Image (tube, coloured by chain):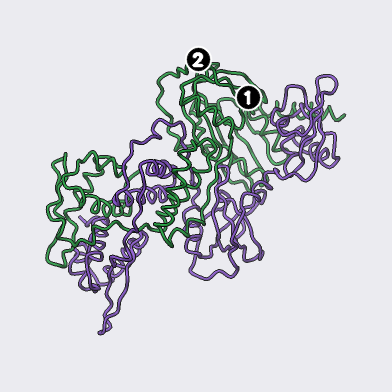
Amino acid sequence: MAIAKAERLMNLALCLLGTRRPLSKRELRGSIEAYIEAGTDDSFNRMFERDKDDLRELGLVIETVENLDGDIGYLARRDSNRLPPVELDAEEAAALGLAAKVWQQARLAGAASGALQKLRAAGMPLADDPYDHSALEPRIPAHEAAFEPLMLACRDRRPVTFEYRKANAARPETRHVEPWILECCRGHWYLAGWDRERRAERVFRLSRITGRVRSRSAAFTADVPDHVTVRETVERWAGEIATSTARIRLRTGAGYPLRARATAVQPAADGWDELEIPYGHGLDAWLVEFGPDVVVLEPAELRADVLERLRAVAKG
Amino acid sequence: MATNAIDQTRRMLSLVTYLRERPGARVGDVARAFGITEDELIADLDVLPLCGTSFRGGDLLDIDTDGDRIWWRNPDAVGSSTGAPLRLAADEATALLVAARAVATLPGLRESDRQALLRATAKLEAAAGEVAGASSRLSVTFESEGGVFADVDRAIAERRRLWLRYYSPARDQLTEREVDPIRLFAVGHTYMEAWCRLSEARRTFRLDRVAEIRLLDDPAEPPELELRDLSEGLVQPSAEDPEVVVEVGPGGRWVAEYYPHDSAEERPDGGLRITLRTPDPASLRRLALRLGGDGRIVSPPELADSARRAAGEALAAYGE
């Protein structure tokens, strides 16, 4: 049976951490059983390169040193790999314990537990978890397939290419983006970055990315701003940034959310109220949801949009 | 979640550091400290004796357990540098810092917990050093439903019943009910899971739809229930629920993002044919109206009729 990958990685890590002088590839190959069994030079080389990358993902700083004879050696120096002293009390430890549980994405959930384990090994106290009895259970979902590749591309500042279907587009389009940040608003993930074709900042909703995200090693062409606000864009899409006011009639007792947003409510005749509500993008679609319980008074533009939608539904 | 090789390696490296300081550590305590099951720990302990620095002449970790305590018989054999706690990787710092910052924004968090979290975050940023920078490329905010959240949190802590005026979008109605709160959770929005005494069933309430809330003096007495597993999503339609088929054009593709569905087939016009299940198809009349020209209900026919009728009545009010 092939030797388990975790065993192989662990051996490589211990060798690199345990040495004071750089170890050559030949020495490593001779001392780790899985490498002895690796077969050809090619398959060993591929395995070794992958393993080094994996250990670096785990945070290990592995130095490559060339000696006088031109041989390459590897080592993980004690100083560059040590966690600086960090003293956390029981309360702080419990708070981090709660935070570590919020990820529902496998890679980040694993990384968060890994971080806690390192801190635990460094002496972080194990508190009786006060959150066991707490009501609060925050969760961060990240089910979108595009999440992980984009997270890595943001981290490593690598440009990406993906197919993106805008909310009302019939076909997806290829977009070339320099990814800046991923932000989760209202349980949905968004990417903000520089759109190379449009030469402008754009926000993308991850659930609208179709197919694979491809990334490559290349420099960004645009400056990364210090501050990126995804939330404002999302609120504008959701029509929460009002540009003017609309006047509607609403049946008494109906449409609580409209009332909650209204700036003025006046009783009108025959079981109706008259409301003033903020008018932004998407209000027409929202009002139509209330069917015969809402009548738009003004502006005329909104009234026309609502009528058009109603006619489409009435036609079936 | 199955352990992958990366996570296991990461864990074993920390285990080596941890065990070095604690000869004779108990299996149960170590498993708890590492947030893993005893079986997972035993699996790690099976691998560790196969690891070491054999280039120096066969020094493998001599770590052994009798199922109760763990003994390491040659802690000096593999070099003391393997004993130092390892620095945080970029992903590790990001995962913990982003989560900690997000949780710290939760409106209902107790102030002492928030302070502890902020202190821990600052210490973690310092300890992570330059890799902490990557954590600014990921950000999460929870919605704030402040006042309501505090009341629910208090009701749970004090095991008290709540009175609610709650908005149901499906019926466009406010209903009054008494509930026995069970827990609060946040997935984008913040929700309360509670035993509803009106429907005598477990219900999930979105806090931004609570129009009014009052703590009652009666004790909360929810029946013993197994907590729902939320990892599969909030809405979990059952196989017995009636089926609804919606056809949408490109402008209605968002329906597939917002409604959990069984299938969404591509249509030649760039739209979708979406099949979903709901216990109450009538509640989708809102959706049918909202879609306008961007989609239509294919079945059940009663739902399509009710949307058409509602649109007709609405048009009448405009004199059409």
- Residue at the image point whose x is 32% and y is 71% from the top: A63
**Observer-nearest residue: A198 or B219?**
B219
- Residue at the image point whose x is 24% and y is 44% from the top: B41
Q: Amino acid at mark 2?
A: Asp
Q: Which residue is mark 1?
A: B212
Q: Mark 1 belongs to which subunit?
A: B
**Observer-nearest residue: A227 or A303?**
A227
Note the chain letter of the green one: B
- Image colour for chain A is purple
Q: Which residue is mark 2?
A: B218
In the image: residue A16, left or right of residue A310: left
Q: Amino acid at mark 1?
A: Glu
Q: Quadrant of residue A238?
A: top right
- Residue at the image point whose x is 52% and y is 39% from the top: B187
Mark toward the start of the polypeptide (1 vs 2): 1
Q: Secondary structure at mark 2?
A: strand
Q: CA distance from mark 1 to mark 2?
A: 18 Å
Q: Is A78 situated above or below B142? A: below
